Image (cartoon, rainbow, N blue to C red):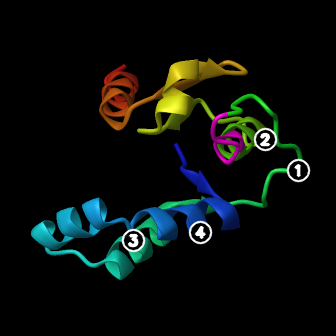
Amino acid sequence: MKIVSCEETTAELRRIIDYEKFTQRLSVLGFSQAEVLAYFMNLVFHVPSPEFIPEKILEDPFDNFFLALASENTARLIVSGDKHLLTLEEYSGIQIVTPSEACRVIETVLNL
């Protein structure tokens, strides 16, 4: 199992973890944004940016980037809290699940 990321998705994480709701949560947990980003960078497998971006989600076009990244890297899961992605439930045979659902799926696979 590997988690893929590219330059654009890493930039999106940088942007998101600067939101006040996340900085407060991280502070309570005793983590800085830099620590979270460093952990993320060591956890993921870095791949090239997708070549083709579908126009599946019109409400938030950047979400299409995650669909392309998953599709071009033959992912089995897209893990997200984003409502636009979660509403799709799947894309090109790739399940789109919440983080808690992903944990259950991974547990099931590892227990086989």
* Outermost residue to the right: 51
- Front position in the image: 19 or 107: 19
Q: Classify 10 Å Cα crowding around label 2: few (below 14), some (14-19), many (20 and above).
A: some
Tags 3 and 2 touching, CB below 8 Å: no
Which residue is labeled 3 in the image? 18
Q: Callout 4, which amino acid?
A: Ala
Depth check, mark 1 against mark 3: the one in front is 3
The residue identified by callout 1 is: 51
The residue under label 3 is which amino acid type?
Asp
Q: Which residue is mark 4?
A: 11
Which label sits in the foreground, 4 or 1?
4
Q: Is residue 95 above or below residue 36?
A: above
Sequence-wise, the earlier of marks 3 and 2 is 3
Distance (Cα) linking label 1 and label 3: 28 Å
| Residue 35: in magenta span | no
Magenta residues span: 59-64
- Give how far apart the Cα atoms at labels 3 and 4 are: 11 Å
- Image check: 102 left or right of 91? left
Q: CA distance from mark 4 to mark 1?
A: 17 Å
